[in-house]
Each structure stands twice: as C-alpha cells, then as structure tokens.
Amino acid sequence: MPANSRARNEALIADYRRLAEESEKSPFNAYHEGTDRSLGVIASGIAANYLEEVMPKDGSMPWVKIGQYPLPEKMIRRLFDECDSVIVIEEGQPVIEPALRGILPSEYKIYGKLDSTLPRTGELTPDAVRRALSALAPGRVPAQAESYAASQVVVPRPPALCQGCGHRDVYAALLSALASYEAPRVFGDIGCYTLGYLSPFNAIHTCLDMGASITMAKGAADAGVHPSVAIIGDSTFTHSGMTGLLDAINENSPITVIISDNLTTGMTGGQDSQGTGKIEQICIGLGADPAHVVTIDSLPKNHDEMTAMLRREMDYQGLSVVVARRECIQTARRKK
Ligand SMILES: Cc1ncc(C[n+]2csc(CCOP(=O)(O)OP(=O)(O)O)c2C)c(N)n1
Ligand code: SF4
C-alpha cells in the first residue's frame, strides 16, 4: 500500500547504511595482511579459491576477500592506500571492478577485466588468474602451471543422449516426419533432449530458456512458418511450458508441441517431475482439443507409427500435442 511503502522506503534506506556497517565486520569479508605491497588483490567467490591456489604461499601478497555485500569500503580503501597496484579477480561479468570507481579517487589504477589484464570472456580459471598475477608480479607467481600428461584412459568426447534413451526415438521419428517438408523449424528447450541439437540428430534450430520452445514455435507460426514444432520435456513443460501452451491454445495456433515425457527430470539427476501421470489431462484442462492430444510410447518398434502420427499432427492446421513417453533409463535403473 502506498502509505506503507513510503514509510518502509525510509527504513529500507536506513537498512542499507546498517548493511554497509555489517559488511565491514562480516566473517565473510576479510583483509589478509601481506608483507610485499607491490601488488594487492580483491577477489570474490570462486575467484578467491583460484587466487589462493596460485598466489605465493608465503603470505606475502595482501588481499581482500569479498563474500558479503555491500562492498566493505574501508577494507578496500585500505588495500588501495597500502599497495602500489591492485587487481580485482571475479567470475563472470565485472561487477566489483566498476563499483570501485564509485569508492576510489579516479587516479587509482585498477587492474582486472575492464583493462584486459584478465580475459573478459570465457570461464575464469586458475590458469587465467596465474597469468594475470605473473604479468603484474613477475617472479613472484610463475606463469606456467605444473603440466600433466594427457590421460590415456579418459578421452574427451562430445556429450550425447544415453543409448536407449526415449528422446533418441522421438528425434529419429521427428526427422523422418520432417523430411517431406521444405522449411520446417523445430524449437528446442532445456533438458537432456537439448542434445538433439548435436550430431547425429541435428534436429533442433533453437534453444533459449525453459519454456521458450512453445512460445517461439507460436511466434514462428504467427509469422507463417509451417511446420512449426516445439519439443519440450515433461518437467520443463510443467515448469514454464504450460503458460505458453495456453496462449497457443487460445489462438489455436498451427503448431505441433511434442512433450518428450521421460517421467523424470533427467538432466538434473532424476528428480520427480511435477506432471507425471497427468500430462495429457493438463493439456486438455488448458483447453487443447482432446482429438489432437495424442500419446505414443517412444520405442524403436513404434518408429513408423510415431512418424505417421507426427506428420498427421503437423498437417493439422491447429494446435496439437504429441506426448511421446518412455521412462529415462537411468531413473528406471536406479528404481530397480
Ligand atoms: C529457470 C531454470 N530453472 C532450472 C533449470 C535447471 N534445469 C535444467 S534442465 C531442467 C529440466 C529438465 O527436465 P525435462 O524437461 O523433463 O527434461 P529431461 O532432462 O528429463 O530430458 C532443469 C530444471 C534451468 N535450466 N533453468
Ligand atoms: S539421463 Fe535419461 S533422459 Fe537423459 S539422456 Fe540419459 S536416458 Fe535420456
């Protein structure tokens, strides 16, 4: 309510001041003294672990560990005052580094991602931290890590769907069904079945975020694409596919939504799925035409039947849902 929010806003601003004070004495923020003040470091999160891995082991490098926000300004000012130069090491996009500009006078030089002392893109690694420290503190940190011979046992290989996974049979049938169309588009989603993007299937064109398969398929159909196919897992469907489906149902959009139902959340380790046993009822409850909510077991022996079913539903100029069902073999094995 506006009258309350005005009063609460005062309290909120006061809280910010209190949180800033708490941050200075937080056990998650720490000023580590060091004897060699030619280079100081500010590091947060996993970057602090990388720093501890590669920094001199004699405790000579002063550094501030950030684990609680807002930034502990007093600690940071002290580090800059005591050291000749300071590097900020943080994972992902620079957040602390630009924030320091609001804390420190402009003449202070800050090394980090913004001046490319650390790579701006890609994953932050201990090696990247090592290289940056060795460039700023030559002789104190070696540029090269100890190297190990490549394993003869574990060899790199691209990720792939498990052999025997039902998603494989869905993609095999989908590719057969799509073969007769000129410019089909398949909108993927997030889960094990995203691997359908890769060889040998190369079956999906997009993968954006949870639930985007259905909304993107609808958008493409609105723009005239046919067939426009969404492929989504049962868990992602109940996470954020249902709202998009309702929209597509309301407009009877000519899209084919394949729900590849493996009765679990395979990609994140086999947790229970919210819609198990009621996927079809959910679709019909949202308003899908029961004549176009069809189910099939995704088994190799059903390849031809599944292909024909998909083609039939793609040719239907309205919304259809194909539920292809087979339990994830990893989950099934664990249950056994
Ligand atoms: C917003 C969001 N929350 C959670 C996740 C983590 N996550 C990755 S895949 C996935 C669900 C996969 O389950 P399903 O759609 O059933 O596909 P499966 O892996 O079982 O084939 C989840 C929750 C995510 N990627 N995004
Ligand atoms: S974990 Fe399950 S769903 Fe994922 S690829 Fe393997 S069999 Fe398929």
Image: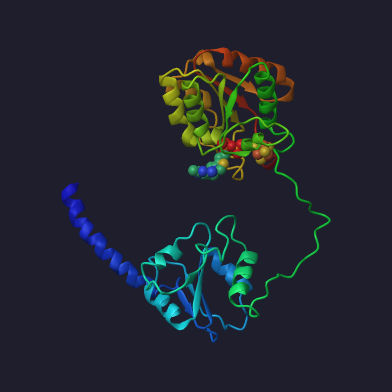
Is residue 70 shown left or right of residue 121?
A: left
Is residue 252 or residue 164 the one in the foreground?
252
Q: Is residue 237 above or below residue 177?
A: below
| Residue at image location 71% in from the left, 20% down from the top | 303
Residue 234 visible in the picture: yes
Residue 61 percent location from the top left of the image: 55, 80
Residue 166 percent location from the top left of the image: 68, 30
Q: For ligand 2, which image quadrant applies?
A: top right
Q: How is colour applied across the structure in the image?
A: rainbow
For residue 68, which quarter of the picture? bottom left
| Residue at image location 53% in from the left, 36% down from the top | 236
| Viewport quadrant of the C terminus | top right
Q: Is residue 6 above or below residue 293?
A: below
Residue 232 percent location from the top left of the image: 56, 31
For residue 158, which quarter of the picture? top right
Q: Residue furthest bottom?
A: 35
Is residue 88 shown left or right of residue 185?
A: left
Residue 195 percent location from the top left of the image: 65, 37
Q: Is residue 81 above or below residue 287?
A: below
Q: Residue furthest left?
A: 3
Residue 332 visible in the picture: no
